[in-house]
Amino acid sequence: MDLKLLSIFDEVYKTRSVSRAGENLGMPQSSISIALARLRRHFGDPLFVRTSDGMQPTPHTTSLVAPVRQALELLRAVTRQQAIFDPAKAQRSFRVCMTGITHLVLLPQLMNRLSEVAPSVRVEITHISSRTPKMLESGDADLAVGFMPELEAGFYQQKLFDQRFVCVVRKDHPRIHSRLTQGMFRREKHVVVSAAGAGNELVERELDRLGVQRNISLHLPDFLGIGALVAQTDLMITVPERVAETLLRIAEVKLFKPPFTLPGFAIKQHWHERYQQDPSNKWLRSVIADLFLER
């Protein structure tokens, strides 16, 4: 058994794609296909079957994943002291789980920085979900960035910045001019974004505690198009401050401090303890941290 075949096996299992596995390993697709053929002969099993959802594993493949990964982890442990990641030459792909906030605030800065220091590195973004902890544990995702209090045992975390909430309305709002009062907040129609990591549950919990009811007329699943929506209607939205700063740059809106004291929260990057010493993961974490240390 060529030990390189184990890495190919694991990468195809993670990506469910021959082409993406080749990209991540820096190998042509034909080499991945040849390797799969060797693996199939060795194990006497199809291992992966092509479906509309990609290359899906057979039951035998699923039973092999854990011991294969244990073997790979042992090999990495042996060679870890010599492991080097050179971003200028690297041609690998990172998968990062993000909330809507970090998508708006972090992603443009991250891509600009990567184009400078790691021009051949690729990034795939996926939404934060209930699967995120398992993805981090298995290596299907390298990092998760956002407000995720559910990530605790087995995960490292680093605080990037604190967030507070602000209220946003269109610049020429007919009733809200230079200040926002409690009465205005109660009377105006609100739009609420229910995306994971948006912090709306913190706002709702505190307003309930204060006995304040918002007149919510629109619920949205994410922040897509929110700048144009607020700029072209009389709706008010309460969002994390850095989201509001982004809206201020791209839309005709204005910001106000909420007339009620609302709790803040921290945006963090999270990774599994298995990848604490991984050179490429450490490098990506340092790039993201530096982006906020500079602000």
Image (spheres, helix red, strand yellow):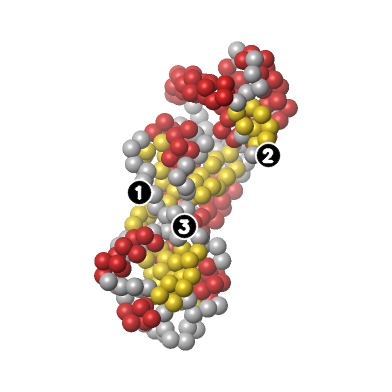
Q: Secondary structure at mark 2?
A: loop
Query: Disc 2 versus disc 1: distance between alpha carbons?
Result: 35 Å
The answer to whether residue 76 is above or below residue 191 is: above
**Which quadrant of the figure has residue 11?**
top right
Q: Secondary structure at mark 3?
A: loop
Q: Residue furthest bottom?
A: 174
Check disc 2: other Cα within 10 Å, few if <14, some if 14-19, many if 20+: few
Visible in this render: residue 249?
Answer: no
Left or right, 36 with reference to 258? right
Check disc 3: other Cα within 10 Å, few if <14, some if 14-19, many if 20+: some
Q: Nearer the viewer, residue 214 or 165?
A: 214
Give the amino acid at mark 1: Pro
Give the amino acid at mark 2: Ser
Picture coordinates of residue 194 (x, y %)? 45, 60
- Quadrant position of the N terminus in the picture: top right
Say the numbered circle drawn on residue 52: 2
Residue holding disc 1: 149
Q: Nearer the viewer, residue 290 or 43?
A: 43
